[in-house]
Image (cartoon, rainbow, N blue to C red):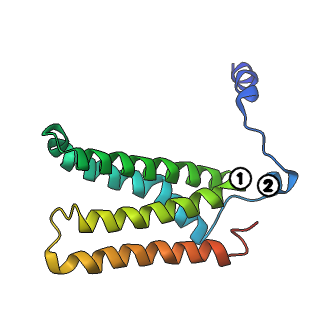
Amino acid sequence: MSIGLMSILRPLELDPGSPKLARAARPTGWLLVLCFLLCVWEPLSLALSASSSIDAITLGQPGRAAFLAFRILVAGVGVAAGIAIWNCRAHGLTLAKTTLGLSAASAIIRYTWFPGNAPPDLRLPLASLLVGINAAWYAYLIRSRKAQG
C-alpha cells in the first residue's frame, strides 16, 4: 500500500532546480532560526494582533483594515521566504530580504499610527528595536557565505 502512495506522490515532488541547490543541505544555525521566525513567529504575531484588532475593523476603521492587509502580506511573503530557504531555493534570500524590509516598515507604522497598548515613551524605542533586529538579519543575509550558497 505504501508503494502505491509513493507512486502517487512522486509526481508532486518539486524540481530541485540547479544541481548545486539539489546537493545543498538544509539550513542550520542562524539561517534555521530565520526560517523559524519567518514561518512560525511572524504568522503567530499576525494572528495575535489580528485577533485583537478585528473589532476595530468591524467598526469601520479602514486604516486598521489596510494595515492588517499589509501585515498579512508581510507574513505571507515571510512564509514563502522561509519555505524557499528551507528548500535551498536561490530566490529565498531575495524574499527574506524583502520580508525584512516590509517587517521594518510594519514596525514603524505599528508604533507610530497604531500604538495599541504600548506606552507613549516606549513607542520609539520599540520601533527602533524592531527595525534594528530586521537590519541585523538583513546584514546577516548579505554577509553570510552559507546563506549565499
Q: Is residue 17 left or right of residue 80?
A: right
Residue drawn 53% across the image and 64% down it = 34
Viewer-side residue, 143 vs 63:
63
- Asked if disc 2 and disc 1 are in contact, CB closer than 8 Å, the reply is yes
The type of residue carrying mark 1 is Arg
Residue drawn 20% across the image and 78% down it = 122
The type of residue carrying mark 2 is Leu
The x and y percentages for residue 21 are 79, 55
Viewer-side residue, 101 vs 35:
101
Q: Looking at the image, is 80 positioned above or below residue 120?
A: above
Crowding around mark 2 (Cα neighbors within 10 Å: few <14, some 14 to 19, many 20+) is: some
On residue 89, which mark appears? 1
Q: SS of the residue at dot 1?
A: loop
Crowding around mark 1 (Cα neighbors within 10 Å: few <14, some 14 to 19, many 20+) is: many
Which quadrant is the N terminus positioned in? top right
Disc 2 to disc 1, C-alpha distance: 7 Å
The x and y percentages for residue 99 are 51, 59
Which quadrant is the C terminus positioned in? bottom right
Q: SS of the residue at dot 2?
A: helix
